[in-house]
Image (cartoon, rainbow, N blue to C red):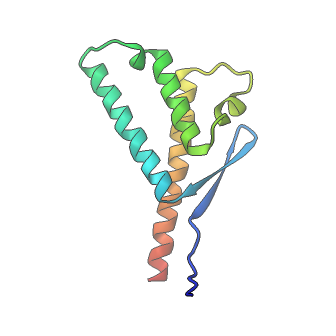
Amino acid sequence: MTDEFKFKDQQLLLKLCGREFSVIAGEETAQICGDILTEAKRRLEKLKCGITDDEISETGICEFLKESVEKLIGIGSVDIIFGKRQQTVSDMADLMCYVVSKIRNGYIGDAKQDKMLD
C-alpha cells in the first residue's frame, strides 16, 4: 500500500455582511464558475436578440444570480446574507461580483504560490 501526500486546495474565507462563508479554490469551483459564465452568456444572447421571457426578466435574473452565489458558497447563504433586506437584482449582482472577484484572487494567489515553489 502506498500513501501519498497532497496539498489541499486553498480555502477562501469570505466575510459577507457580518457572516463568514468559505469557498474552496479548486477544480470543482472553477467548473461551477465556468457553468455560471456559460449560462450568463446564454441569457445575454437572448436579451440581445430581443427575446423576452421569464429567464431574462428582472426576477429571473435576480433568481439566476442568487442560485449562482449559492452554488459557490452554499444553499441558503443568500437569505442569510440579505436577512430582511429586499433581494434586488443590483444588490444580487454586486454580491455575485464580489464573491467571484474573491475566488479569482484566490486562484491568482495559488498561481503566484506555485511560481514561488518552482
Q: How many marks?
A: 0
8 relative to 19, above or below = below
Q: Does residue 104 appear anywhere in the picture? A: no
| Residue at 50% in and 67% down | 110
Residue situated furthest left in the rendering = 49
Residue 24 occupies which quadrant of the picture? Answer: bottom right
Nearest the eye: 48 or 76: 76
Q: Residue 30 at x, y = what percent?
A: 45, 53
12 relative to 43, above or below = below
Residue 66 occupies which quadrant of the picture? Answer: top right
Q: Residue 71 at x, y = what percent?
A: 55, 41
- Taking 107 as reference, is 43 left or right? left
| Residue at 46% in and 23% down | 61
| Residue at 51% in and 30% down | 65
74 relative to 30, above or below = above
54 relative to 8, above or below = above
State which quarter of the image contains the C terminus.
bottom left
Q: Residue 38 at x, y = what percent?
A: 35, 39
Nearest the eye: 31 or 93: 31
State which quarter of the image contains the N terminus.
bottom right
